[in-house]
Image (cartoon, rainbow, N blue to C red):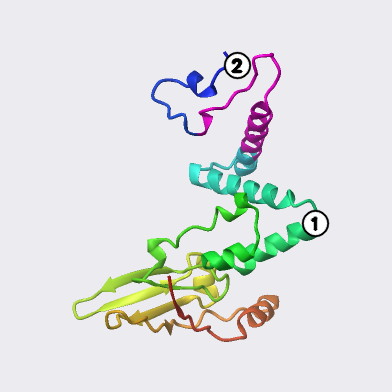
Amino acid sequence: MLTGDLARLLPDGVPPEEMTGVHLINEDGLFEEDLFDLDHEQREVARAVHKATRDGRSTSLAELEQEMDQVTVYLGLRKRGTQEAYVKGRSDLSRMPVGTETEVRRLNLPSVVGQFYRPISFAALYEQWWFACPVCRWPMKVTQHRSRKSVTGRVRCFYRPHAELMGASYTFKIPDAGKPPSLIPGAPPPAPTGAASVALYVRLGGASPVGCAVPV
């Protein structure tokens, strides 16, 4: 049975997806490369599940997928063969979480890593405009809030500590059609103390940053 297409072994109603065309044993009874690839993938999944549920924690499919994405990126960068290449790849991902197709291609990332650059989510867009978090540079969440007299826009980093503690939170008035919004910084975050205050000043220059609209 294992000499045939692995997709045929799946129960009825289960989509074959990537199993189509996978063979584990050839006609001569020798193991195919697909077998070793499948074994490796299963071990990585088991490792991700163990990491996500250690100490008795519960997990979700979304969290497990995020853990697997981290594993995929790590393995993709490690295949470059040197520590220097790995560090450069990690640095490039942190430095440029968003970019045009041309900018992303110039990073020369492995295809298995580059696939994680995807179109900006609608949740982070106001018409054709998006806003980079001044802390992490990721697109921020855009919402609109209606009152009896007006509609106000709000822009906040998806990562709550950046929005609530580091100033990545703004409002804007709805602009005329085709014009980018002008962000207004929200209330200053609570002043940190001790070592945290030094780190915050170094990162943000000691002031609430101003966001800029960037067209898609």
| Residues under numbered marks 1 and 2 in contact, where contact means CB atoms less than 8 Å apart | no
Q: Quadrant of the C terminus?
A: bottom left
What amino acid is at disc 1? Gln
What amino acid is at disc 2? Thr
Q: Residue furthest front?
A: 27
Quadrant of the rendered image containing residue 106: bottom right
Question: Would residue 176 appear left or right of 181 to someone viewing this image?
Answer: left
Question: What's the mark number on residue 3?
Answer: 2
Q: Nearer the viewer, residue 47 or 5?
A: 5
x%, y% of residue 34? 64, 29
Q: Residue furthest left?
A: 148
x%, y% of residue 69? 58, 48
Q: Over which residues does the magenta segment extend?
A: 18-47
Quadrant of the rendered image containing residue 196: bottom right
Residue 19 among those drawn in magenta: yes
Q: Is residue 35 above or below residue 161?
A: above
Q: Is residue 56 above or below residue 94?
A: above
Q: Quadrant of the N terminus?
A: top right
